[in-house]
Image (cartoon, rainbow, N blue to C red):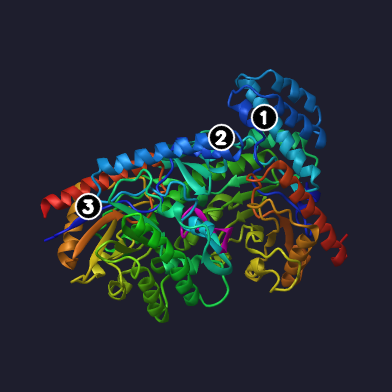
Amino acid sequence: MIDQVIAYQHGIFPRSEDVVAATRGLERGRVARQAVDARFEADLDLFVQTQREARLDYFSNGMLRWQDVFRPFVEACSGLQARALVRWFDNNSFFRAPEIIGALRPDVGFASVASPLGVPEPRLACLPSPYLFSRAAHASGNRNTLMLEVAKYVLRPAIEELVKQGCGLVHLQEPWLAYFGIELGDWDEFERALHELRDVAPADLVTIVLHTYFGDVAPYAARLRGMPVDAVGIDLVETDQSALRGPWEGGLLLGLLDGRSSVVEPVEESARLIRSIAETLEPSALYLSSNCELEFLPSDVARRKVLRLGEIARRVREAS
Amino acid sequence: MSEARARISTPLLTHELGSLDKPGWRVKANAGAQLEEGDVEEARIWGERLQVPDYQDLLELLARSPLGEEERAEVRRWSSRYGLRLLESAGLDVVYDGEQQRSEMYAWAVAHADGFEWRGSVRAFDNKYYSKAAVTGPLSLREPYHNDEFSLLSSIARSMLKVPVTGPYTIADWSFDERFFRNRDLALPASERRRTRHAARRSFVQEVARELIRPNLEALIGLGALWIQIDEPGASTNREELDLFVESFNVAVEGLDAFFSTHLCFSDYELFFPAIEAMHGCRQFAVGFANYDARELGRSGDARPGYAVISKFRDLPYQPILGLGVLDIHSDFVESPELVRDRILYAVDVFGDPNRIQVTPDCGLRTRSWDVAYRKLANMVAGVALAKRELRLS
């Protein structure tokens, strides 16, 4: 029996062909900034409309203007810069690694991260997990110390701002743990870093989801479930779900839409699998989304996947 | 011919990599747009600066814009002449044309093949995107797609040519697979899914190598190409598929008579080892390092953190040459000749043999303006001269 099924789309959503052309033109000095802004606004409108049409439970701004998952934080904080281009895990996609060049302090604020403009409630925001941030950064020194500093001085103030703006769900992206793993001795520090975030996001106001992807996290499931978050996300495309054991205390996010495949998932087969997993693991709440951000797909394909997510969620609810 | 082959092995030989930005006059004319005075002036300035023979003919052609189809093709050929002259004028030993006639390294290959369908644009980073296709049917080559440009460049180049060809693994990796990997049932055990996915991927990559790349290589060799660089920026994308990259390189080049090299960039290069120990047909690895390196001078390991991995290339059993990336192509920072020199001398010290080091940018300079690209390349050549002086090679 599944009591609560919540569907939302996380991560950076792909830009439309119009925005692609406009931003290319901007860089070549052939398109004005205002024209680019207008294209971005049209993209946001379409993405909100798509989420509405899919009847998703939370609305995202699609992070359409974000150059990568770290960039707004680099721009908002002193002590960080973005320079070296690094492959984003096993994708033909790259990010500029945040480079630590001084003490981390919020500088210009997090308006670009927390702005609710154009996004209806209830809203979700997507942030890099502190473990991911500390490992992807270019830095010398102890990574766990950095993780705590990132949590305290970068992510925590951003979440405070999000809470002020009425954000209802904070989705923490954590591909590093799933892809590269984690040392036994790092778990406690990771947990402490998450507590820093939980402290400013009261559970009755904000749901925190820690979402792992790009790897099989079945071996880490027991420890992940003990983290101070409301739900843990798994990448169903990469994770051996038969290795997961219930009861799953807490919420579970199933990342079932493959964000790296242009093939759109079937409704019935997907709904059947979700019900089967939910019945086995008995999570307190079930969240449905894609395994990873959809920005590896062209926008039309991604839009079809979001609509399909809504269909699958409805099918799961109907059958429960 | 044998003299030309011998020149390929010159110590600290310099060469280009990949594409240059396409000038505004080329982009607009090719799109059938009306050119503005500034576009024509840009063609004039660079024509004069690079001393492109008969460039006034281009100016006359551009003045007639918007252009018809054959005239646009002529503009693309002019763009090739300009690209070639830019690289020659910067002083490089081995050149091409900055891929001025190609749409883009992946799109150009796919557009000349059957078996793909376009799906749309996908972002690579920042505001840089590429068009992505899906494989949907049996792959075949419509026609060899580098012959025309190679024939043109052979007829006008003053320096040796190296033909860049997009590699099979990269073409497969940058495509969606809607044909080979069919059983996506998430209820299957993960290990079985991975096995099925890997097998499907092998079929895809090998079909690209066999049906698209090898026929192109054969055609180029038939036209006299001596050095062909298989570009594989996607090679290290997936650490579990390095065997597929190596196999596909071997399938594409085995038994063909040319100097084959490969280009790798923006990766954790440690991942390539030990897989590339089986890549015997590769005589040179051109690899980007400057992106990861410090900008201060120095020849010690501490001073050159971006080059820490090069000893692994040194230790490959078949002793390939290392094409040392010394220019960060994602920045307008123009490396000084002294910085280039120090990067080279560090690498020569690690290899213990300047014959195994050649010098290149990290990757194609297409994200830089021609002015920045030219200054970077000229400084690279100057840095090589400084290094040669210290090594008493000049």
- Residue beneath label 3, please? A270
Category of crowding for the residue at label 1, using alpha-carbon neighbours closer than 10 angstroms: few (below 14), some (14–19), many (at least 20) = many
Q: Is residue B252 left or right of residue B283?
A: left
**Disc 1 versus disc 2: nearer the observer:** 2
Q: Secondary structure at mark 3?
A: helix
Residue B262's place in the image compared with B32, above or below, is below
Residue A192's place in the image compared with B272, above or below, is below
Q: Residue at x 30, y 46 (%)?
A: A120
Magenta extent: A79-96
Q: Is residue A246 left or right of residue A26?
A: left
Mark 2 residue type: Ala
- Asked if the residue under mark 2 is in contact with the one under mark 1, i.e. CB atoms within 8 Å, the reply is no
**Mark nearer the N terminus (2 vs 3):** 2
Q: Position of residue A290 (x, y in %)?
A: 32, 53
Mark 3 residue type: Ser
Q: Residue at x 21, y 70 (%)?
A: A248
Q: Chain of mark 2?
A: A
Q: Quadrant of the C terminus of chain A?
A: bottom left
Q: Which mark is residue A85?
A: none
Q: Which mark is residue A32?
A: 2
